[in-house]
Amino acid sequence: MPAYGVYDKVSCYLDDKDKGIKASTSSRGVFEYSYHCENGVNCVARDSVTGYEPEYPCKEDSITKQMICLDYGVIETTETTFSCDDGKTYSEEEFRKQYNRLYTNNTDQKKSSSSVAESSSSAAESSSSTEQSSSSAEVTCSPNLDKFFSVSKADRYSIDNAAPDASSQAKFDANRKITAIRDSLSKDTPKCLKDMQEDLERNFVAVYGAPYANRLPAEETCSDGTTRPTKEYLEQQKFDEEQAKKKPQYDEKYNEVYKEETEKFNKKIDDCLNDSNSIKRIACEMREMCPLYGVNLKCSFNYKCDDGISCQGTEGENDMKCTNKQGEEIKYTQEEFEKIYYTKSSY
């Protein structure tokens, strides 16, 4: 009968007298080990170690089915086969499906099995003997290669990531909105809208590929017939639970920043579309400078415009001080400045 939904595997034990190299058919060697199984079958495991310089530096692992790729050097591989006296030869994957390969002597196991058989005439004695043999026998486990999980220890929901993640998403969505607007316009796209989209696209970060995720067995099958999660799987579950606890705080900050950034971009888009003079306005590049310490912590804004004028503004103040190409000083209020100029990008 299966224990906990998993059918028992036959246990095979490594011969204590057979732990060395039995043969050497090449410079790298063939390692042989003898196993004695509880069903009476004896097997010889042969680990054939080879090395080669590959034409393409990648090889699929025969057990995990993952690709192994090296940047340089020589690939060394080990191919394990099991030749048994029942007339069959197994690959390592086939052998593991039928047998548990254990690295302990089976003397105590045989004694406990004999004790159970001799006391089978009495139900009480049989139960007692079985408990004694179970407690004395060492339980060994091997990975279940049919079920894997991805290991990821990235601190995805750190509160420090919320603002930059939200800002990046707001820029991406604003860029998509501008593209949709440009596609729907029957007339030429306002220059301010084109410049805004160019500025957004310059801030995008190109990502090539996805981060590598290591895959490990999620379960292990033990010699007592049970199946249990691996240590690594339990550690990943604990990490995931900690991430889940951080997510509400992350989401709150993310939504707050995303809303602010989206409203800012939407206003710039609407102002550009609604202003009849938007196509005639002059483009300016803007540089923002904010002090990190000192008495005056207000940010200042410097503008370089396409008509040769340079302007300076200060956070919280409405006046703009400008100088034209002839060196003449001109003063604008913030509203007057925005009727003539618009910011296309930062420098």
Image: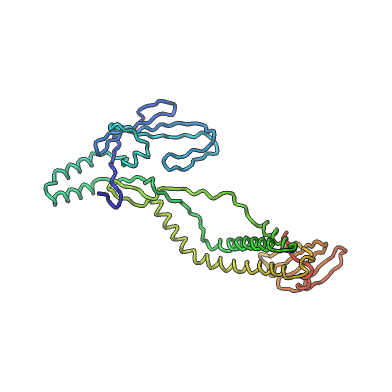
| Farthest residue, direction top | 25
Q: Is residue 152 above or below residue 312?
A: above
- Residue at the image position 34 percent from the left and 33 percent from the top: 89
Picture coordinates of residue 40 (x, y %)?
A: 24, 36
Q: Quadrant of residue 295?
A: bottom right
Question: 292 left or right of 118?
Answer: right
- Can residue 210 be seen in this snapshot? yes
Tell me residue 234's x, y (percent).
Answer: 39, 54
Residue at (25, 45) in percent of width and height: 137
**237 or 275: which is nearer to us?**
275
Residue 313 image-quadrant placement: bottom right
Residue 261 spot, x, y in % from top left: 63, 66
Report the quarter where the C terminus lies. bottom right
Q: Nearer the viewer, residue 187 or 231?
A: 187
Residue 20 in the image: above or below residue 257: above
Q: Residue furthest front?
A: 186
Which residue reaches farthest right? 326
Indicate whether 256 appears above or below 125.
below
Q: Is residue 294 rendered to the left or right of residue 325?
A: left
Residue 83 locus on image (x, y percent): 33, 32
Give the answer, above or below, for where 22 lies relative to 325. above
